[in-house]
Image: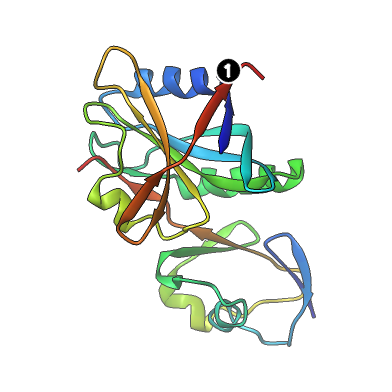
């Protein structure tokens, strides 16, 4: 099946989960990454059970924060 | 070297002053020219912490900005935030949360009458000031 990852079309295996995609894409520091599928935010504790489908569009967003303290 | 248009600098300062004493924040995007970064667009995002000493970019706005950068053909270059009452240098928290060593981290201080903007390269607990050029165009 075909999905789009960060704007790039990719051929991936049927049944691919978000958790496996995070590994396959070598996402650095996944604890700081928020994932969206078709603009819906996926809770990190459901990555392993969230199965991707043909045509899905996935984005990885890194947490950005800090402060003066 | 990192180059910022004067109009974008003024946009950051105006927003940060409006938000003070809460920290303001956003993203920067543009193009790479060799080792130089040319900022083409400054994004103003909501600080979801709504705090005077912390900021977190709103992830929904971040998603929208990332898509806009892609559509414009820009490269994400980093982020910016304000320090309403402290100097323009990364705090320990800024350094701890700066996990992307390829990004530029811009910090605007409003502690003095004249705002001070600096850009930093942060790697681990080391922050190095980048050469920031604010130009008319």
Judge by depth and name the residue closer to the eye, A7 or B10.
B10
Judge by depth and name the residue closer to the eye, B51 or B98.
B98
Q: Is residue A24 visible?
A: yes
Q: Is residue B3 depicted above or below A37 in this figure?
A: above
**Chain ID of residue with mark 1:** B
Q: Is residue B46 visible?
A: no
Q: Which residue position holds label 1?
A: B7
Q: Secondary structure at mark 1?
A: helix
Badge 1 crowding class, 10 Å Cα cut-off, few under 14, some 14 to 19, many 20 or more, is some
Locate residue B133, reporting x and y percent: 54, 28
- B38 horizontally vs B129: left or right: right
Name the residue: 48% across, 42% down: B79
Name the residue: 40% across, 28% down: B117
Name the residue: 22% across, 26% down: B85
Locate residue B114, reporting x and y percent: 33, 14
Locate residue A3, reporting x and y percent: 75, 71
- B66 horizontally vs B115: left or right: right
Q: Is residue A38 depicted above or below A13 in this figure?
A: above
The answer to which image quadrant residue A63 occupies is: bottom left
Name the residue: 50% across, 32% down: B132
Q: Quadrant of the C terminus of chain A?
A: top left
Q: Is residue A38 depicted above or below B7 in this figure?
A: below
Locate residue A5, reporting x and y percent: 69, 67
* Number of callouts: 1
In this figure, which colouring scheme has been used for the structure? Answer: rainbow
Q: Quadrant of the N terminus of chain A?
A: bottom right
- A19 horizontally vs B96: left or right: right
- A42 horizontally vs A57: left or right: left
């Amino acid at each position: 099946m075909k999905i789009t990852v960060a704007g790039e079309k990719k051929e991936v295996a049927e049944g691919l989960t978000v958790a496996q995609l995070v590994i396959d894409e070598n996402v650095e520091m996944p604890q700081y990454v928020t994932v969206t599928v078709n603009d819906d935010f996926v809770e990190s504790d459901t990555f392993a059970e969230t199965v991707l489908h043909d045509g899905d569009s996935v984005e990885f967003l890194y947490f950005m924060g800090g402060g003066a303290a | 070297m990192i180059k910022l248009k004067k109009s974008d600098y003024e946009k950051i300062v105006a927003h940060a002053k409006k938000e003070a004493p809460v920290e303001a924040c956003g993203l920067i995007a543009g193009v790479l020219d060799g080792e130089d970064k040319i900022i083409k667009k400054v994004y103003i995002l909501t600080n979801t912490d709504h705090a005077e000493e912390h900021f977190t970019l709103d992830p929904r706005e971040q998603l929208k900005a990332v898509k806009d950068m892609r559509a414009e053909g820009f490269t994400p270059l980093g982020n910016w935030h304000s320090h309403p009452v402290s100097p323009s240098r990364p705090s320990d928290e800024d350094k701890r949360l700066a996990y992307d060593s390829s990004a530029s981290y811009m910090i605007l201080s409003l502690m003095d009458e004249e705002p001070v903007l600096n850009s930093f390269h942060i790697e681990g607990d080391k922050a190095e000031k980048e050469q920031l050029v604010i130009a008319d165009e």
